[in-house]
Amino acid sequence: MKRCSRCILPETVPGISFNNDNVCSFCQDYEKDKEIKIAGLENLITQEFGLDSSLSLNTEAEKRNALEKIFNGVKKQNKKYDCLVGLSGGRDSTYVLYVARKIYKLNVLAFNWDNGFQSEQAMENMRTSCKILNVDFVSVPSKNNLFQKIQRYGAKATLKNGPFPLVRSICTDCTWAGAAAALKYAAKYDIPMIIYGQSFAEATEANEYKALSAFNAMKAKKRMNINWYKQVFNRILLRFEFHVPGNKYLSLQLPVLEKIKRVILFYYIPWDRKKIKETISRELDWKIPPESVSSWRFDCRLHPLINSLFISMLGCSKDAFGYTNMINEKNMTRQEALAQEEKLIEQSFSEDLRNVLRTKMGLSQKEIDTVFSYKRK
Ligand SMILES: [Zn+2]
């Protein structure tokens, strides 16, 4: 299979093209797309996250100064907690917790939105790191397993329509519920700031969207079965369960609360994959499960399903789009990415995934067989 000579994206990705040096269009557009992403983020930070727009943020030193200024501002308020950190037990959120607590000495409430699909190792990592850092920890599931039900009925409703509708719906409700639940808790405990752990390297939505847009959205009438209505019903219940006051109940936007400052940590400090992994392994006894291909995204047990579906639709994993970013950011070598991608392909549609679909998602044997019939031949 022909692959990009810089990243590892294969020729099977819809819409991809290669130049004379076999560099793919995603890599060719990388710098331009990054500028757009940064401009968008800077706009978000100044407009919405309430940053003083007179602050200069051009150099690394200036960014660190700005971060200190923000952190000192919340410390001065002398609240029980200076900030809330959303924790998944994965690599980046654990590092955010470490930086907030150990480097900047903030009083942190570690908050976990339990989507019902978290891996054991992720839970273990959260408990251990909070114990070592002496940080209060809350883990909040949906009271009636609504997120699991949304996944179950969503899968049942759309299985016959191929892998695309399934892959499209998996992460959206989780992202919303995680954001809403964190805000709700921050408000409840009068916490003035939330620190987020997103990074550019891992922001893959735009490239995934480019590749996935080749697939036609499912026809509306095919969706209208009893399971689809059950999914919608549970989605509405989830919206009510984690409703953030002042926000619309059924809005597609992520909720906001003006009084709570929001900080994207990796805008202010560099994101360095190896350094992050080394630091949390050494300082917080952080581990990845032995069977895990990489240190990225092992925290959710639905992720192998998403990777498997991507591999069947596009010929590459969802993670491969992140590798493209990491390679272009010089945070990963092509060889390393290729080795991980080959393992992901080998491990796609695994027995473990069957287990997750049966025990966590509640699919029948027949339904699981349908999912597995998507496997790329
Ligand atoms: Zn490429």
Image: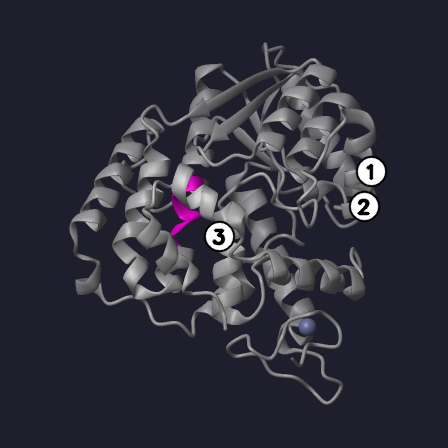
Circle 1/circle 2 CB separation < 8 Å: yes
**First in sequence: mark 3 or mark 1?**
1
Residue designated by label 2: 274
Left or right, residue 370 beside residue 302:
left
**Kind of residue sitting beneath label 2:** Lys
Occupied quadrant, residue 167? bottom left
**In the foreground, 115 or 178:** 115
Q: Main secondary structure of the magenta part?
A: helix
The 10 Å Cα crowd at callout 3, few under 14, some 14 to 19, many 20 or more, is many
Residue designated by label 1: 278
Occupied quadrant, residue 61? top right
Occupied quadrant, residue 88? top right
The residue at the far bottom in this view is 20
**In the foreground, 62 or 195:** 195
Residue designated by label 3: 305
Q: Compute the Cα span from label 3 to label 1.
A: 28 Å
Residue at 43%, 40% in the rendered image: 174
Q: Compute the Cα span from label 3 to label 2.
A: 26 Å
Disc 3 under 8 Å from ligand 1? The reply is: no
Residue 271 visible in this rendered orientation of the protein: yes
**Kind of residue sitting beneath label 1:** Glu
Q: Tag 2's secondary structure?
A: helix
Q: Tag 3's secondary structure?
A: helix
Q: Compute the Cα span from label 1 to label 2.
A: 6 Å
Q: Tag 1's secondary structure?
A: helix
